Amino acid sequence: MDRNEIGARGESAAAGYLERTGMRVIERNWRIPAGEIDIIALDGDTLVMCEVKTRTTARRGSPEEAVSARKRQKITRLAEAYCSRNGCDPCPVRFDVISIMVIQPDRALLRHHRAAFIVE
């Protein structure tokens, strides 16, 4: 399985997980030239911008460690663009990270980090 396929499977697993927890996924892989938001969901009246990181090894750290300060800034700018383009200002926005560590071809450990970072 190549890296893109692993990432796509991780995002599908994350979207399914979010829906099972009662959230409504409204966008997957929302993209503009500046970048992409993996999953955009509604949790009640809160708009959730979700970054998904999937790894098959911890050699380079845990999946959530890949969401650097630079990546968080980029996601924040993309969220602002999404809200501006879709008329969802003002509404509460939360930034979550879903970390997936594949432990066997058919098994993975999923961690949901709610409000993983705050926009200041």
Image (cartoon, rainbow, N blue to C red):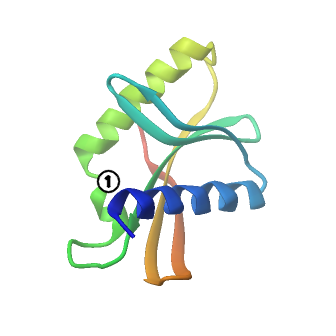
Residue at (21% x, 78% y) in the render: 59
Residue at (26% x, 51% y) in the render: 68
Residue at (45% x, 78% y) in the render: 102
State which quarter of the image contains the N terminus.
Answer: bottom left
Rendered image quadrant of residue 71: top left
Mark 1 element type: loop
Left or right: residue 11 compared with residue 76: right
Of 96 and 108, nearer the camera is 108
Of 38 and 9, nearer the camera is 9
The residue carrying pointer 1 sits among few (fewer than 14), some (14 to 19) or many (20 or more) residues within 10 Å by Cα, namely some
Residue at (46% x, 38% y) in the render: 37
Query: In this rendering, does residue 120 appear at all?
Result: no
| Percent position of residue 63, x then y | 35, 66
| Percent position of residue 77, x then y | 37, 26
Q: Which residue is mark 1?
A: 67
Query: In this rendering, does residue 59 appear at all?
Result: yes
Query: Is 73 rendered above or below residue 1?
Result: above
Rendered image quadrant of residue 118: top left
Label 1 sits on what residue type? Val
State which quarter of the image contains the C terminus.
Answer: top left
| Percent position of residue 76, x then y | 39, 32
Left or right: residue 89 compared with residue 117: right
Residue found farthest to the front? 1
Q: What is the count of numbered marks?
A: 1
Query: Is 19 rendered above or below residue 47?
Result: below
Of 25 and 96, nearer the camera is 25
Rendered image quadrant of residue 64: bottom left
Residue found farthest to the bottom? 104
